Amino acid sequence: MSVTEPQAATRCLAAHVAGLNATDLVPEERVLVARAVLDTVAVGVAARDEPAARLAVRRARAQGEGPCTLWTASGALHVREEEAAWANGVMAHVLDFDDVTSVMRGHPSVAMLPAVLALAEAEGLSVSDVTAAYVAGFEVIAALSAAMATPHYARGWHSTATIGAIGAAAACARLLRLDEMRVAHAIGLAVTQAAGTRASFGTMAKSVQAGNANLTGLRAARLAEIGFDAAPDALGGALGFAQLGGGGTLALPEARDARALLRHGLEVKKYPLCYATHRALDAVLDLRAAHGLALPDVEAVHVHASPGALAPLIHHRPTTGLDAKFSMEYAMAAALEDGALHLASFEDAAVRRPVLQAFLSHVTADEAVGALLPRWAEVTLRLKDGRVLSTRQDALRGGAEDPLSEGELLAKAAGCFAHGGGAATGAAALLSAFEDPHRAAGPALREALTGAVLEERI
C-alpha cells in the first residue's frame, strides 16, 4: 500500500468529512435530509414502469440477491449493495423529478442517497448515520461546485454525474467512518471514475449517469476502506479534476464549509421535467389562470430567461417523454393545453399529440446577457385577439427560498407512490421514519416501501 499523503484541496475536504459528527448537526439539517430521502425514494418508486427502470432492475437482480432493497414500492426485492446503489440511482433520476441545488447546477440527492441508503442497509446503520453522511457529501458538493461548477457545466459535463460522484464518495466514506487519509483516497478514487455528459440529456444514458455516480461513490469508499490509495491531490493538483473539468486549479478555503445545506438549500420540483423550465412554467400557468386562457387562444409564446438558464434545454422538437423533459417548447405548449404538467404529461403518446406538435414552432426562447445569478424568467404571450400578456417569475416555487410545505411535499410523494403502484401511505411513513435519528435506516426504508406492486410486473 502506498503511503502517499493527500494534500491541498483534497485533504481540506477529507478533514472536514472525517471530522463531521452527527452531534454537529442542527434540527433544520435533519429535517432537510428527511425530506430529501422522501422525495428521492418517492420519485424512484414513481419510475418503476419506465423502460430504463425496468432494465436497471432486471440487471440488478441478475447479479444475485443481497441485503439491499430495490425501490420498487413492494420492498420485496433485495440485491447486492452496488447493484442497489446503481439501479435505485437510475430509477430516481429517469423522471427528472428529483431535487436540485443551484450551486451545483445539478441534482445532489439522486447522486448520493441511493448509495448511502444501500450502504446503511448493508451495514445496519441508523437514520442519524445517514443524515451525517448526506450532510458531509452535500458540503463537499457545495465546495466543489462553488469553485468550478459553472465552467464545468458549460464545457458539457453533467455535474450530477461528476461532482455528484465525488460527493457520493465523501458521503459513503463518512458512513463507513473512514479516517482523513482514507476519505481523501476515496475522493481520489471517485475522481478516477467520475464521468457524464450533457449530450445524454433526453436519453436513458442520463439516468445511467446518476446511477453511476452512486456506484462510483460507493465503490470508491469501499476501495479506500480496504487500502487502495489515489493521487495526492486528485481534485486540485496538476492534471487533477478541477484542471481537467473546470479549466483551472482548485483553491478551497481551509475552514470547513459548515451549514452548506442550510445556505444553499434544496429545490424540490413541482413538475417532472428539467428545472430550467420551472420559472417559465409558473409564469405561463399564472397567466393562463388569471386570464382564462387555453392553447387555442395563443398565437405565440416567448420566454426570456436569465443568463445560462436555457443550457439544459437541448430538445426543441421532442417526440418522446424523455426528450420532452428538456424542451421549453413542449413545456409551454403542454402547460397551455392542459393547465398543468404531471407524470402522465411525459408519456410518449402525450408528447406526440398533434395539437402540441403543431404548436412547438410557435414557442421561442432566449437568454439575457450578464451574471448567472439571480435567476428569473419572463414569459410573453401573443394572443390571437391581438392582446400581449407578460409576467416575470423570480422566486422558484419549491426552491430554497419558497419551499414546498410539508403537506405539499407529502402530496407529491403520495402521488409518486400511487403512480408506481404502491400505497400512498408509504410517503408519510417514510418521512416519519427518517425524522427519527434512532431508527435503523434499512428497516425504516423497507417498511415504507409496501403496497400493491406485483413482483412479476418488474
Image (tube, rainbow, N blue to C red):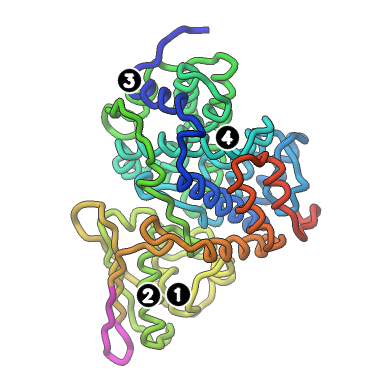
User: Looking at this rendering, what residue extends furthest in the left direction?
Assistant: 370
Q: Residue 327: percent from the left, percent from the top?
A: 42, 63
Please identify the quarter of the rendering in which residue 440 is found: top right
Q: Residue 158: percent from the left, percent from the top?
A: 42, 43
- Disc 2 crowd, CA 10 A, few/some/many (<14, 14-19, 20+): many
The label on residue 8 is 3
Q: Residue 151: percent from the left, percent from the top?
A: 29, 41
As shown in the figure, which amino acid type bears the numbered disc 3? Answer: Ala
Q: Nearer the viewer, residue 90 or 15?
A: 15
Location of mark 2 (residue) = 284
Question: Dot 2: what SS?
Answer: helix
Question: Dot 4: what SS?
Answer: helix
Query: What separation in Å lies between label 2 and label 4 (alpha carbons)?
Result: 42 Å
Is residue 303 something that shows in the picture?
yes
Judged left or right of residue 372, residue 398 is: right
Which one is in front in this view, the residue at disc 1 or the one at disc 4? Answer: 4
Q: Identify the residue at image location x=77%, y=56%.
A: 457
Query: What separation in Å lies between label 3 and label 4 (alpha carbons)?
Result: 27 Å
Which one is in front in this view, the residue at disc 3 or the one at disc 1? Answer: 3
- Disc 4 crowd, CA 10 A, few/some/many (<14, 14-19, 20+): many
The label on residue 458 is none
As shown in the figure, which amino acid type bears the numbered disc 1? Answer: Ala
Residue 129 falls within the magenta-colored stretch:
no
Earlier-in-chain disc, 1 versus 4: 4
Query: What separation in Å lies between label 3 and label 1 (alpha carbons)?
Result: 49 Å
Earlier-in-chain disc, 3 versus 1: 3
Instruction: Kindly indicate whether the residue at mark 1 contacts the one at mark 2 (C-beta within 8 angstroms).
Output: yes
Location of mark 1 (residue) = 335
Judged left or right of residue 418, residue 409 is: left
Question: Dot 3: what SS?
Answer: helix
